[in-house]
Every structure is written in structure tokens, then in C-alpha cells.
Image: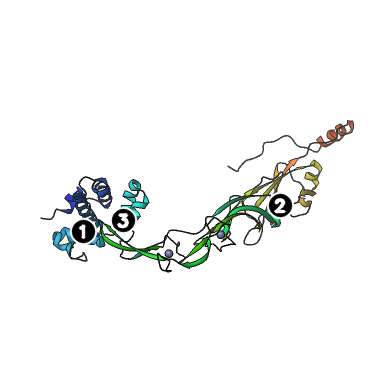
Amino acid sequence: MKKDYYEVLGVERTASSDQIKRAYREMAKKHHPDMNPENKKEAEEKFKEVSEAYEVLMDPQKRRLYDQHGHEGVSQTFRGGGFSWDDFHHFDDLQDILGNIFGGSIFGDIFGGSAGQRTREPSRRGGDIHVILTVTLEEIVGSVKKKFTVDRYEVCHDCGGHGGHDLKPCPQCKGAGRVQTQSRSIFGTFTSVTTCPQCNGKGRVPQKPCTTCGTLGRIRRARKIEISVPQGIAHGQYIVLRGEGHFGLGGKGNILVEFEERPHQYYERRGYDLYIRMLVPYSTLISGGSVQIPGLNGKTTDMVKIPKGSSAPEIVRSRGRGMPRPGGGHGDLYVELDLLPLTKKDKGVNKVIEELKKYEGEATPKKRRNV
Ligand SMILES: [Zn+2]
Ligand SMILES: [Zn+2]
């Protein structure tokens, strides 16, 4: 007599998929054969039983069939008329549940070939290199070239990456680069194709070891790399130099160049807009005029127009004179006006100030907002 699926997982007939998932999580841990070395056989059966229940109750269609017609209703949905591991669709969940206990590797071995023949290739691409490049605002605006040095693995020039000389077909894989392995597990016997461990997939093995690289096929070298600083690049953004990273058997890695913007003495950057604070003489504020600001674009100075009747603090906006945008165009330049204190003081100034007072009004509060 086959046991009721809900009973197997210990859940109510009205259980939600979340509750079912939680129940299965507990059961799968409890009954996994590797957790029960004393009675492996019994655990295997129990583990399969809870997995079958999980497969049915997690699938709305199968669950409905089961609710209406019992075991007979669902048995025909299994390929062999009865549940086998080929009918199980939740290996990912299992990996989740058990991966933490056993680590990825054991699990990979058990489930690796569950879809019949499958090729498992470890990633053999060379590693990436992360570089942090400090740039100034001037360099970002001027799209200058910059150099930096990386210490990376490169293919051994002596043996061409084979690790040795006098290449002969690999005896283990007969030159195919791949080998078939059969593994028996609680889920049945699986055939899997893997990279040949003797030749690392190359199909040929050297007879004489390379002394330049010590058979590794790669050597470490310091390399100078030159890049153009992308116009308008911002702090924390990066570019990828494909194939410039470490050499590996399956290809070269990348270099990630992350940009770090050095704070500027005068300018503050907000997005693509630039802010500068200028101390401006009172007379210029009143009558208007041009003032010189430090330039970023190779020029030593730039001019900015101060409108007549400006006050301080006040912000003057100069359109299109901010940072270059990557897609074209520029942000804006904001000049924050501040009052330049008198630099020369003698008796004459007192007279001027007395004179000035005749034209000034009273100190008055300035509105922050209209209410
Ligand atoms: Zn070599
Ligand atoms: Zn081989």
C-alpha cells in the first residue's frame, strides 16, 4: 500500500507550496543517504519517497490529478509508469538544500550526469585582473592616455602553453581530449564526459618538460597597459579590457579598470555638472562683468560672465560648460558667487563706504520660499 503524499511530507492537504517546500527541506536533510551511513538502503528509499511526493505536490497539475484520483492518477505522468529520478524536476532545490551541508563537489558528482550524457567543463578561462586607476578632472575632460602595469600570467613563449616539448597523442583519451566516466549512485548509473585529466583537454601530451615555465604552460610577466581615459567617466565606473587578463587553458581573462576620481582643488562634480565657488568684488556684482575661472580643458583660465546686479550668495549657470557626457554634449557649469572682502584698507576706503551708505537700503530678511 503506497503512502499518501501529504502524509509522507507531513503536511496538510491544504498546504501552500511554501509549506510543502519547507517540509521537503526538512525531510530531504533527514533522509539523505549520506546523513544516514548506518542504514543507507532504508534512507535511500525514504529519500526517494519524499522526493516523489515533492515532485507531485509542487506541480499544480500533478497535484490536482493526485487529489482527484490518488496514486493511479499521477502514475501515468511518470515516464516509466512509476516514479524514477528521471521524473524529478527539482534538482536545483536539492542543490540548495543539501549544497550547504556537503559542499558543491559531492553534489556535483551525484547529479552531474542525471540527464543521461552531459558534459561538465570546469571554467578554465584565465582570471580577471582588477585595477583601480586614479584620474583627475582634467584627465577626464581631456581624454588623455594613461599607463599602468599589471602582473599577469601569459602563455609560455617557449612551449606555446603545452608545458613541454615533443608532443605525442595523449594515451588516456587517445587524442580526443575528453574521457567518459561511469558512476554509480543512488540515482542509477550515469555516463558523463569530462575533460581528460592527463592532457587537460589538449589531446596531446609533451614528452619533454618545459624548463621555462616548469610545465605550467604559463609564466608571470609585468606588462604595461595603455588606455585612453573615457571622456566624462565617473568615480566608480569601469571599463573592461577583454582578453587582457590572465592566460588560462580555456582563454584569457579580462582586465577591469575602475576609475577613481581625485577630488579637485576648486571644482566639485555632481553628475555631469560642475560647481565652482568664486569670490567676486562687490563692484563686479553690482555692475556685472567677466571673471576668470580656472580652466579644465588644457587652458589655464576660462571667462565667466557675471550679470549686472548680482548678489552674493547667488549661483550663475553657464550652460554646456560642465563635464562631457559619454553620449555627446556637456553638463552645465554653476558658479557660486561669494563676496570678495576688501583686500586693501586705508583711510580712503572709509570715505567711499560712507558715500556708499547713501545708496544702500536697510538690512532685510531674504525669502527662502514663497508661502
Ligand atoms: Zn613552457
Ligand atoms: Zn588526454
Answer yes or no: is residue 251 visible.
Answer: no
Residue in the image at 78% along x and 39% along y: 340
Report the front residue among 163 and 45. 163
Dot label at residue 138:
2
Q: CA distance from mark 1 to mark 2?
A: 66 Å
Q: Amino acid at mark 2?
A: Glu
If the image is split into quadrants, where does the C terminus sit?
Answer: top right
Task: Answer whether labels 1 and 2 touch (C-beta < 8 Å).
Answer: no
Q: 34 or 294, which is in the foreground?
A: 34
Lower position in the chain sequence, tag 3 or tag 2: 3
Ligand 2 resides in the quarter of the picture at: bottom left
Q: Residue furthest right?
A: 348
> Which secondary structure, mark 2?
helix
Where does the image place residue 59, in percent across and percent down from the top left?
A: 25, 59
Foreground: disc 3 or disc 2: 3
User: Label 2 near label 3: C-beta < 8 Å?
Assistant: no
**Mark 1 burial class by Cα count in 10 Å: few <14, some 14-19, many 20+:** many
Q: Secondary structure at mark 1?
A: helix
Say which residue label 3 marks.
110
Relative side of 282 to 319, left or right = right
Within-10-Å neighbours for mark 3: few <14, some 14–19, many 20+ = some
